[in-house]
Image: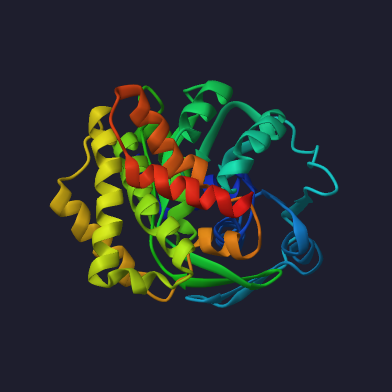
Amino acid sequence: MARYTSIWEVICEVDNLNVAVLGAGSIGSLIAAKICQYGVENLLIHARGEHGSAMALNGIEVRGQDSFIIKDKSMIVSLDEVGFYTGLKNEIDILFITSKANDVISLMEKSLHLLNENSKVICLSNGLGHIEKCMDFFGPHRVFAASISHGAWRPEPGVVNWAGKGNISIGRFGEGPGLSDAEEIINLLSMSGLNPIWDDDGRKLVWSKVLLNIAINPVAALIGCENGMLLRSNLFELCSSIMIEGATIARQEKVNIPSDEELNSKLHEVIKATSTNFCSMLQDVKKGRPTEIQFLNQAVVDRAERYGIPTPKNNLLSELIKSLNS
């Protein structure tokens, strides 16, 4: 990271940024609220539904790990039902895509006019393939891999419960930008209290999150349980075997992921830490919304087929979850 002669130089640099958070559900709204609490020149939030309307009318209320309400004149809320905000053309310095996986391509296409030659893009949506698509669309020089471990959920429209503090990991993906290019992003997230961490291996970063998601989300969604129930020995063994199937494909793609033992230890740690959470896939199933299964277990199956490697558990889970949406 760059060396600054004083903290004031860092603050001034962050204050002058224009930031966009697109697809602001629970996590996106938390990120937007913390960034706005710190203060930037302009903050564009694109959302939808009752939650988006409540933010547009009343601002964002954060509860849990921190308690505050954001009603800031620098916060611009754009509603999907009304249309994408057309201001700030070529003026956004940092673009966060925090939507459900199914909405990533649509938001990419809508947001291109916001960027300039120096803009940076961070996609925090779950699943495989998003970083590659962003790099193809925006250009590889703009896009970072990213993953988030903060916990957040929405008890009511316009309100975000910050359930657990974590971090936002950012990394270099392939020939994409490196640490020196990430200074503004890291400074912004650090000053906003979101605990950024740099990871030189963005592919490992993405796959590590995916392996946890394919193991936890579909099983919890099918059973209809809190994550903590997956610690029962028979269910944990099932989750582990699903994850190891995915790890086999990651290793086939030369991703430097940890050993199976380390992966199992991390899986146990994450399930325990989120034991009272109802995962997002279960929430989607309950509300009849499309799930992210095609970007998680189905994406693993699709990649496995390229190598002729069977992934029966991921295939079965994918088919079962898809049948719930049919």
**Can the viewer see residue 5 in this picture?**
no
In the current view of this chain or complex, which residue is farthest to the right? 82
Q: Nearer the viewer, residue 66 or 291?
A: 291
Q: Nearer the viewer, residue 240 or 268?
A: 240
Residue 121, image x, y percentages:
53, 36
From the viewer's perspective, is 151 left or right of 250? right
Residue 153, image x, y percentages:
55, 68
The residue that appears at 50% across and 35% down in the rendered structure is 130
The residue that appears at 65% across and 55% down in the rendered structure is 289
Q: Nearer the viewer, residue 219 or 316?
A: 316
Q: Nearer the viewer, residue 23 or 237?
A: 237
From the viewer's perspective, is 140 left or right of 18? left
Residue 62, image x, y percentages:
59, 72
Figure colour scheme = rainbow
From the viewer's perspective, is 145 left or right of 109? left
Total marks shown come to 0
The quadrant the N terminus occupies is top left
Residue 176 vertical placement versus 106 (above, below): above
Residue 52 vertical placement versus 179 (above, below): below
**Can the viewer see residue 116 in this picture?**
yes
Residue 105 vertical placement versus 262 (above, below): above
The residue that appears at 39% across and 36% down in the rendered structure is 301
Residue 267, image x, y percentages:
27, 59
